[in-house]
Image (spheres, helix red, strand yellow):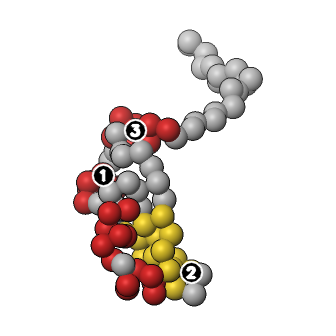
Amino acid sequence: MTITVVPSQEFDQAASKALLAANNGPVFITDQGRTTHVLMGYGMYQALSSGRQTIADLLALPGTGDAELDIARSRELPATKPLI
């Protein structure tokens, strides 16, 4: 997924470029350096707003094939409950 940042003045002059960029990931539109809006494709919007998502739904989002996931392995033992 590609994240694009576009100043609002540039967005006003080249909205079509921002729309194309939104096909590859969210476009953050800024005003005086602060993010004010996010432009995204409808498919991504549906995935985010549909409520409950599975890990498969999230992995199916465009551009997530190259995402890195670094999870440290826990050395703690799981809690156990007595049988009786």
Residue tagged by mark 3?
Answer: 59
- Where does residue 78 sit, x and y in percent of width and height? 65, 22
Disc nearer the start of the sequence (1/2): 2
- Where does residue 36 sit, x and y in percent of width and height? 47, 80
Query: In what quadrant of the picture does the C terminus appear?
Result: top right
Where 81 falls versus 30 (above or below)?
above
Residue tagged by mark 1?
Answer: 47
The residue at 58%/36% (across/down) is 69
In the foreground, 51 or 59: 59
Left or right: residue 23 compared with residue 78: left
- Where does residue 43 sit, x and y in percent of width and height? 26, 54
**Mark 3 Cα-neighbour bin, 10 Å: few <14, some 14–19, many ≥20:** few
Asked whether the viewer can see residue 44, the reply is yes
Q: Secondary structure at mark 3?
A: helix
Looking at the image, is mark 1 or mark 2 nearer the viewer? 2
Q: In the picture, residue 9 is in which quadrant? A: bottom left
The amino acid beneath tag 1 is Ala
Left or right: residue 52 compared with residue 75: left
Left or right: residue 55 compared with residue 79: left
Disc nearer the start of the sequence (3/1): 1
- Where does residue 59 sit, x and y in percent of width and height? 40, 38
The residue at 52%/40% (across/down) is 67
Q: Secondary structure at mark 2?
A: strand
In the foreground, 7 or 73: 7
Q: Secondary structure at mark 1?
A: helix
Task: Give the alpha-carbon distance from disc 1 to disc 2, as whole Å.
Answer: 25 Å
The residue at 38%/54% (across/down) is 24
Which disc is residue 77 wearing?
A: none
Residue tagged by mark 2?
Answer: 34
Query: Which residue is most to the top?
Result: 83
The amino acid beneath tag 2 is Arg
